Image: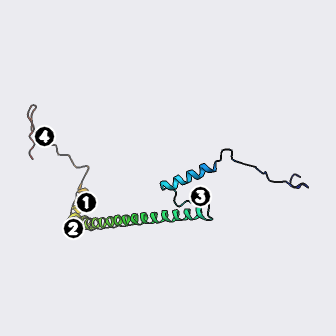
Amino acid sequence: MGWFSPYKRHANNFNYTPRYYDPAKEAREQRRTELRGERLDDGGEYTPGKYIKAKREARDLRREQEAKKNQSEKHIKMWTMGVALILLAVLIYMLIPRLGNIFEMATTDSSVKQYEQQQQEVDAFDPYAPLIIVPNDYEEGDEIEIVE
């Protein structure tokens, strides 16, 4: 019910007048800043599109600087990856022949012969055979000499 009213509502009107505005002081400060060399481009007057143009120029400059930074980072990443690939290739080049030798030694005839000999010894083992007892040759107090 509050949406429709026969009475027209008006927006709030403000009658603002600055209390301490001094146009002479403002002109004096503007002349001083111009004499010091500050704000030469700022004429004090607003021109349409002034702030938009400044923001666009700042954004373009920032994007250009970021593009240069990203390009240098890309070069560094590219060189790093190249060095890593070269090191990996060298590692593989040196490692593969050694791995091949290991596998070759594992499948050579001597290792097969050793395996067959061990299998024959295992097959020939008789758990019911009599044990051979070896007497001790030393007496108490004698030192044991280990000969290498």
Secondary structure, mark 1, is helix
Which disc number belongs to residue 110?
Answer: none
Q: Amino acid at mark 2?
A: Asp
At horizontal 24% and vertical 61% (from top left) the residue drawn is 115
74 versus 36 height, above or below: below
Q: Position of residue 14 (x, y in %)?
A: 76, 50
Identify the colour scheme used: rainbow
The answer for how far apart the CA atoms under marks 2 and 1 are is 15 Å
Instruction: Look at mark 1 in the image and give the residue it sits on.
Output: 119
The answer for how far apart the CA atoms under marks 3 and 1 are is 104 Å
The answer for how far apart the CA atoms under marks 2 and 4 are is 40 Å
Q: Residues within 10 Å of mark 4 (few under 14, many from 20)?
A: few
| Residue 109 as seen in the image, left or right of residue 74 | left
Q: Amino acid at mark 3?
A: Gly
Q: Position of residue 92 (x, y in %)?
A: 29, 66
Q: Earlier in the sequence, mark 1 or mark 4?
A: 1
Q: Residues within 10 Å of mark 1 (few under 14, many from 20)?
A: few
The answer for how far apart the CA atoms under marks 1 and 4 are is 30 Å
At horizontal 26% and vertical 58% (from top left) the residue drawn is 123
Q: Earlier in the sequence, mark 2 or mark 3?
A: 3
Instruction: Look at mark 4 in the image and give the residue it sits on.
Output: 135
The answer for how far apart the CA atoms under marks 3 and 4 are is 118 Å
Q: Are marks 2 and 3 in contact (CB under 8 Å)?
A: no
Secondary structure, mark 3, is loop
Q: Position of residue 114 (x, y in %)?
A: 21, 61
Q: Splitting the image into 4 quarters, where does residue 45 fall?
A: bottom right
Which disc number belongs to residue 109?
Answer: 2
Which disc number belongs to residue 44?
Answer: 3
Q: Splitting the image into 4 quarters, where does residue 78 fall?
A: bottom left
